């Protein structure tokens, strides 16, 4: 029992130490990361598929400048037929100072502007392992 308690106390102390580490402090204070999950907002496959190329180009540009990271695609899904409310094939993480900044970027993306998709933001914080 004592060993478990000591291990727990040490773990909490180490977590506290590393979470306030000065390494990358300016990045940690200035930006946070949000998971972006896309939902299809139309039953019009033609609208969706005609918009996806421009949307993909925008995602690529945001990835190149470091705003978007870790883009995931579900290669088993297709968009031959789309249904409003379905989860889209792609999700990624976006780095922004605030929710509002992230929303401003995402609201300017083609799928949102054409009302072909919506998104949900999930704040996930900062990647703390980069502080080591």
Image (cartoon, helix red, strand yellow):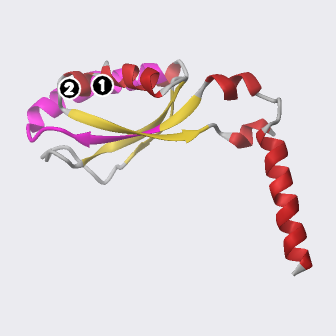
Residue drawn at point x = 26 percent, y = 42 percent: 39
Q: Position of residue 50 (x, y in %)?
A: 16, 27
> What percent of the width, then of the height, locates residue 112?
25, 26
The numbered dot on residue 55 is 1
Q: Which quadrant would residue 107 be assigned to in this image? A: top left
For residue 4, above or below residue 74: below
The N terminus lies in which quarter of the figure?
A: bottom right
Residue 51: mark in rendering: 2
Horizontal relation, residue 124 to residue 60: left or right? right
Query: How many circles with numbers are drawn on the protein?
Result: 2
Q: Nearer the viewer, residue 106 or 123?
A: 123
Q: Is residue 117 magenta?
A: no
Q: Report the Cα–Cα distance between label 2 and label 1.
A: 6 Å
Q: Residue at x 36, y 49 (%)?
A: 74
Residue at image x 43%, y 23%? 100
Task: Report the front residue among 129 and 3.
Answer: 3
The reply to whether callout 2 and callout 1 are in contact (CB within 8 Å) is yes
Of helix, strand and loop, which one carries label 1? helix
Q: Which residues are magenta?
A: 35-62
- Helix, strand or loop at label 2? It is helix
On residue 106, the disc is: none
Q: Tell me if mark 1 has few (under 14), some (14-19) or many (20+) residues whose alpha carbon lies within 10 angstroms of its own.
A: some
Quarter of the figure that contains the C terminus = top right
Can see residue 2?
A: yes
Q: Residue at x 81, y 43 (%)?
A: 18
Residue 73, image x and y in percent?
39, 44
Q: Is residue 34 left or right of residue 17?
A: left
Residue 102 in the image: x percent, y percent?
A: 44, 25
Residue 122 position by quadrant:
top left
In the rendered image, the residue lying farthest to the bottom is: 1
Horizontal relation, residue 72 to residue 27: left or right: left
Q: Is residue 59 magenta?
A: yes
């Amino acid at each position: 029992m004592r060993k478990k308690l000591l291990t727990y106390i040490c773990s909490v102390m180490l977590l506290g130490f590393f979470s306030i580490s000065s390494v990358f402090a300016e990045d940690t204070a200035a930006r946070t990361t949000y998971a972006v999950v896309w939902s299809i907002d139309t039953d019009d496959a033609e609208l969706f598929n005609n918009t996806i190329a421009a949307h993909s180009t925008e995602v690529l540009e945001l990835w190149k400048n470091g705003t978007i990271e870790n883009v995931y695609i579900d290669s088993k899904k297709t968009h031959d037929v789309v249904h409003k409310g379905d989860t889209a094939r792609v999700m990624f993480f976006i780095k922004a100072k605030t929710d509002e900044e992230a929303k401003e970027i995402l609201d300017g993306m083609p799928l949102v502007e054409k009302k072909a998709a919506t998104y949900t933001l999930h704040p996930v914080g900062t990647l703390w392992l980069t502080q080591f």
